[in-house]
Image: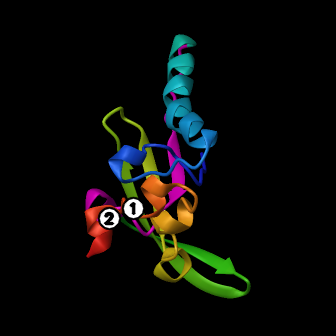
Amino acid sequence: MAAWEIGRVSSGLGAKVGGLGVVVEELPRELIKAAAKQGIELEIETLSPCFAYHDKSKLTKRDLRMPVTLDGHRFEFEVYEHVFPDGQKVVYFWDHLQLRWTTPAAIYPSDPHWGSGCMPPWLRR
């Protein structure tokens, strides 16, 4: 499941701009429960950009690079993953040139709490 905002803001590894973040945070767990009731074993991984403010020390870097072509230019994303305490796995993709602008002020421009001043300590370094 691909998502720009996965919720989980308090973890420092997610984004919630509107209501979609809440849905993406809760949907995988509910889908797995519904599948289990029907005797289906379901595993869901969420694919999301790794924003510049995410603490990469909390992520596991995978020995995998995703090739991408954007406007005729080829480059590769680094791939990371994290399994949250509730079992949900998120796979993150990162490229400094493409995603370095994704700071809290860029993601939350009108939110005084996240967009200005409430930057995680690892981003202030």
Is 55 magenta? The answer is yes
Q: Mark 1 is on which residue type?
A: Tyr
Residue farthest toward the bottom in the current orientation of the protein: 73
Q: Marks 1 and 2, Cα distance to the nearest angstrom? A: 8 Å
**Residue 11 vs residue 43, the one in the foreground:** 11
Is residue 41 found left or right of 4 in the rendered image?
Answer: left
Q: Residue at x 42, y 38 (%)?
A: 88
Above or below, 115 relative to 96? above
Q: Secondary structure at mark 2?
A: helix
Count the marks.
Answer: 2
**Residue 93 vs residue 114, the one in the foreground:** 114
Confirm or deny contact between disc 1 and disc 2 (CB under 8 A).
yes
Is residue 4 found left or right of 57 in the rendered image?
Answer: right
Residue hosting label 2: 56
Crowdedness of circle 1 by 10 Å Cα count: few (<14), some, many (20+)?
many
Q: Earlier in the sequence, mark 1 or mark 2?
A: 2
Residue farthest toward the right in the current orientation of the protein: 71
- Image coordinates of residue 96 in percent, x first then y, are 46, 80
Question: Quadrant of the image for the C terminus?
Answer: bottom left
- Image coordinates of residue 44 in percent, x first then y, are 51, 38
Q: Give the number of the mark in front: 1 or 2.
A: 2
Q: How is colour applied across the structure in the image? A: rainbow
Is 58 magenta? The answer is yes
Q: Mark 2 is on which residue type?
A: Lys
Residue 80: numbered disc:
1
Q: Residue at x 68, y 80 (%)?
A: 70
Q: Point out the stretch of residues depicted in magenta.
A: 39-61
